[in-house]
Image (cartoon, rainbow, N blue to C red):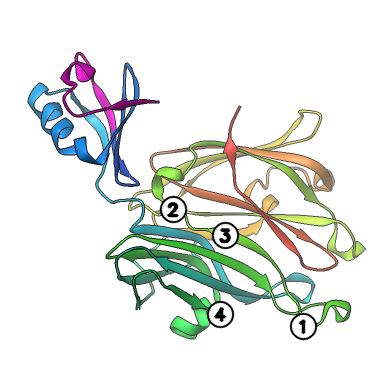
Amino acid sequence: MKTLDRGDPSSTDGLCVSTLLVRERRLHLRTGAGRFVVRKSSIATVLALILMLGVLAPAAAVSSAAADTEHFLAVTSRTEGFAETRWRTRLWVVAGAESADVTFEFYPTSLTGLSGPAHVASKSVAAGTQLYLEDLLGDLWGINGNGAVRLVSTAPVAAFARVVNVKMPSAFEGGTFGQAMASMTPDQAIAEGVFPGLFNERISDESGFRTNLGWFNPGPIAVTLTARVITAAGEVLGERSFEVPALSQWLGSVFDVVWTVPQDQRELKHFTVTYEAGGGPLFLYASVVDNVTGDAVTILPLPAP
């Protein structure tokens, strides 16, 4: 990764900028000559130079939203699940050197997409302090269900959530099992990814694990998703391509997504899901759940090799 400094105009000589993104208070450029990061002190100079030289490609993707003031939780939950699980979402929001007013937008599960958030709420977080919500959906809106949450703040914040099962087997009564869900930004969405280490075993056997797959499309247009299920031996058992509508959020069995896998081949260990998403950012995630305890592990996609 190269770094451009003030007073080095030769660094942009002959470049055609195809992607321009503001992230973590730095300017990120993707060009035919490589990727560059512009320090905060040089952003104004480099932007002026780009405009003067006319090297910004017509189809360049431009993002003006700073990553630290817009965050997405691809899944939140306040619902009952399989095997007598009871899911709740706990959220921590930490402010930096400045106080922040945070707006929370809830996008409930929808396969057909939405035109906007179903619920909106606001909270203030004083500089250097932490906001904690024990039950995100209950505390803010008093609602049940699953969905995504967008956080927009007036100053930089960090956000982190846990989706926890609060109804435990008697041996663990009073405790919780759960999975971490770090907030993400649109530029963190992986267009071509792989989910390793997945399982799907019968709940009725009271053993093993099951896998859920979910997504949230944070953008205003539909995204095309192609997903496939592959065994540990490399055999493709099924593939499916479909459109994910704007602001669509969903979570369910992996075989509700790739339903082309034959019924008699769905009991699997150590299988993989690969995918490609085109047309815009798409957050995908997998959740591998213990059939006995309800304990769940979040698996975020890795870049496809």
**Residue 39's quadrant in the figure?**
top left
Front residue (pair 249, 62)? 62
Q: Which residue lies furthest to the top in this view?
A: 14
* Residue, disc 2: 217
Magenta segment includes 16: yes
Q: Distance between the residues labelled 4 and 1?
A: 15 Å
Q: Position of residue 119 (x, y in %)?
A: 38, 76
Q: Give the range drawn in magenta.
A: 1-19
Front residue (pair 293, 182)? 182
Q: Distance between the residues labelled 3 and 1?
A: 22 Å
90 to 281, vertically: above or below? below
SS category of the residue bearing label 3: strand
Instruction: Give the foreground label among 2 and 1.
Output: 1
Which residue lies at the image location 35% right of the left edge and 58% below the top edge? 70
Q: Can residue 115 be seen in this view?
A: no
Label annotation for residue 80? none
* Residue, disc 3: 181
SS category of the residue bearing label 1: loop
14 to 157, vertically: above or below? above
In the rendered image, the quadrant that contains the N terminus is top left
* Residue, disc 1: 174
Which residue lies at the image location 30% right of the left edge and 46% below the top edge? 25
Front residue (pair 4, 60)? 4
SS category of the residue bearing label 2: loop
Q: Do the residues labelled 2 and 1 touch (CB within 8 Å)?
A: no
68 to 264, vertically: above or below? below
* Residue, disc 4: 134
